Image (spheres, rainbow, N blue to C red):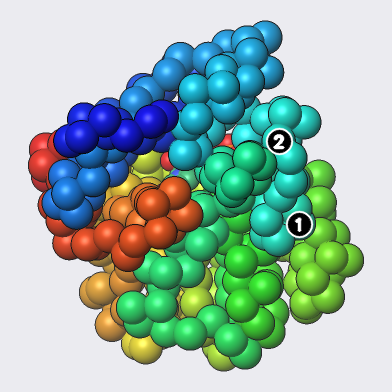
Amino acid sequence: MSEQGNFLHELVGSMSQGAAGNPTVAMIEAAFAHHGLHWRYINMEVTPEDLGAAVRGARAMGFRGFNCSLPHKVTVIQHLDGLGESAAVMGAVNCVVRRGDQLIGENTDGKGFLKSLASVTDPKGKSVVLFGAGGAARAIAVELGLAGAKRISVVNRSEPRGSELVGLLRGKLRIESELTVWRGDYAVQMGTDIIINATSIGLYDADARLGLDVRSLLPGMVVADVIGNPPRTRLIRDAKERGCLAIDGLGMLVNQGVVGIHYWANIEPDTAVMRKALEDSLGL
Ligand code: NDP
């Protein structure tokens, strides 16, 4: 996009199918406005068949980049010029960044989680229990591994997905990891530092219960949930009652936006402004 006085509109956006991410749009555009950037962040409905054409279009129109969500996180890679470190390990991209004339795929989900986690602890040398082995869990596990976590115990309902993640952590990142196939209530071992729900349990249901023996949560443990809507999940409430340090999923969502804006615009956006816009948009 070319500059025309005050009418510069750099473009970034989100390529998805189905779920329109309006709260994300509100959050990102609030940051642009707050920092005086005449930029727009727009949602684009893109079918899998049209993904290649859509990326070529974004390239031709000089987009600074775009987010992509399901079902495009893996298939977008073939249309890009390169990958950042964690996106290459995960094999999934949720944020594309124009660097020079190249489109580079990054993954900001795990980085957003780590930034949110950094408000209470540094994962280096820590023992982690991770519920889930889907896209969010993979992104979080890889970033934790790259940040020096000592051990990641994966707890997942389906064995194949869980084994695949454990294999990736051991093989590509050389960190201690093992799988527990999730049946009944899981009891967290003493010595665990960080417990993370990276499943979809709790999404749109504040009372949904994770198969976890809450008596095994001890004061001082860090408990994090990826669920941002509603943010006060049952796990977060239980963790606080047990004296744990609890981090909700809104922090991850805000911080993956922070990382994306930093990639696109090279600024450190105001997290409080973004969280407020997100909460307002979600009616919280
Ligand atoms: P996936 O579909 O890739 O993975 C879902 C995971 O949840 C799998 O491990 C699945 O287990 C598990 N799961 C789902 N239902 C159950 C159940 N009833 N019992 C046990 N396990 C269950 O989804 P994603 O990883 O992409 O997303 C997971 C959640 O993370 C979503 O709710 C999403 O909203 C949230 N998220 C939040 C972000 C944020 O910024 N806050 C960013 C990205 C995602 P199995 O393998 O056995 O099917």
The amino acid marked with disc number 1 is Val
Characterize the local packing of mark 1: few (<14), some (14-19) or many (20 or more) Cα atoms within 10 angstroms.
some
Residue 267: x and y in percent read 34, 61
The answer to whether 223 appears left or right of 34 in the picture is right
Asked if residue 16 is positioned above or below residue 243 in the image, the reply reads above
Give the number of the disc on residue 236: none
- Using the rendered view, name the quadrant where residue 148 is placed: bottom right
Visible in this render: residue 200? no
The residues tagged by marks 1 and 2 sit, at their Cα atoms, a distance apart of: 16 Å
Residue at (37% x, 40% y) in the render? 203
**Residue bearing the label numbered 1:** 89
**Residue bearing the label numbered 2:** 80
Mark 2 lies on a secondary structure that is: loop
Q: Earlier in the sequence, mark 1 or mark 2?
A: 2
Residue at (58% x, 11% y) in the render? 47
Residue at (67% x, 73% y) in the render? 146
Q: Quadrant of the N terminus?
A: top left
Residue 139: x and y in percent read 61, 55
Residue 192: x and y in percent read 55, 83
- Using the rendered view, name the quadrant where residue 141 is placed: bottom right
Query: Of circles 1 and 2, which is in front?
Result: 2
Mark 1 lies on a secondary structure that is: helix
Visible in this render: residue 219? yes
The amino acid marked with disc number 2 is Leu
Residue at (81% x, 51% y) in the render? 164
Asked if residue 259 is positioned above or below residue 159 in the image, the reply reads below
Instruction: Check if mark 1's residue and mark 2's residue have beta carbons within 8 Å.
Output: no
Residue 224: x and y in percent read 41, 66
